[in-house]
Image (spheres, grey):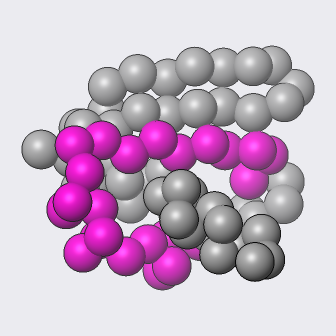
Amino acid sequence: MNMYNYMRQQNIYPINNASQIDSSILTNYIKVIYIDAGADFSYPNNNIYHFLLSKYSHIQKYEYPEIFKVYEFSIK
């Protein structure tokens, strides 16, 4: 089994921009966690955070300086 298939089995969906978000999958869950690992540098204007913020309720933000940010959103 390759890594991508394993991650999907664990409900982990790596994406590079907001157009790759499948909202129909998210309706099966009560929350989504978005891990931003330097997206401003790697994929500027990916709009993932803004898309999630426009659709779901922002619950919490955790920051690990110089590494990544973790955002938690409520789906329902």
Left/right of residue 65 with respect to residue 5 in the rendered view: right
**Residue 21: in magenta span:** yes
- Determine the image quadrant of residue 12: bottom right
The answer to whether 11 is drawn above or below residue 75 in the figure is below
Q: Position of residue 69 (x, y in %)?
A: 66, 31
Residue at horizontal 25%, vertical 51%? 29
Residue at horizontal 75%, vertical 33%? 68
Left/right of residue 74 with respect to residue 68 in the rendered view: left
Residue at horizontal 48%, vertical 58%? 11
Between 64 and 27, the one lying in front of the other is: 27
Assign the C terminus to one quadrant of the image.
top left
Q: Residue furthest front?
A: 1
Q: Position of residue 16 (x, y in %)?
A: 67, 70
Q: Is residue 59 visible?
A: yes
Q: Position of residue 55 (x, y in %)?
A: 23, 56
Region rendered in magenta: 17-39
Assign the N terminus to one quadrant of the image.
bottom right
The answer to whether 13 is drawn above or below residue 64 in the figure is below
Q: Position of residue 56 (x, y in %)?
A: 24, 47
Left/right of residue 25 with respect to residue 63 in the rendered view: left
- Determine the image quadrant of residue 32: top left
**Residue 50: in magenta span:** no
The answer to whether 20 is drawn above or below residue 26 in the figure is below
Between 74 and 54, the one lying in front of the other is: 74
Question: Tag count in the figure?
Answer: 0
Q: Is residue 48 visible?
A: no
Between 16 and 43, the one lying in front of the other is: 16
Residue at horizontal 38%, vertical 60%? 51
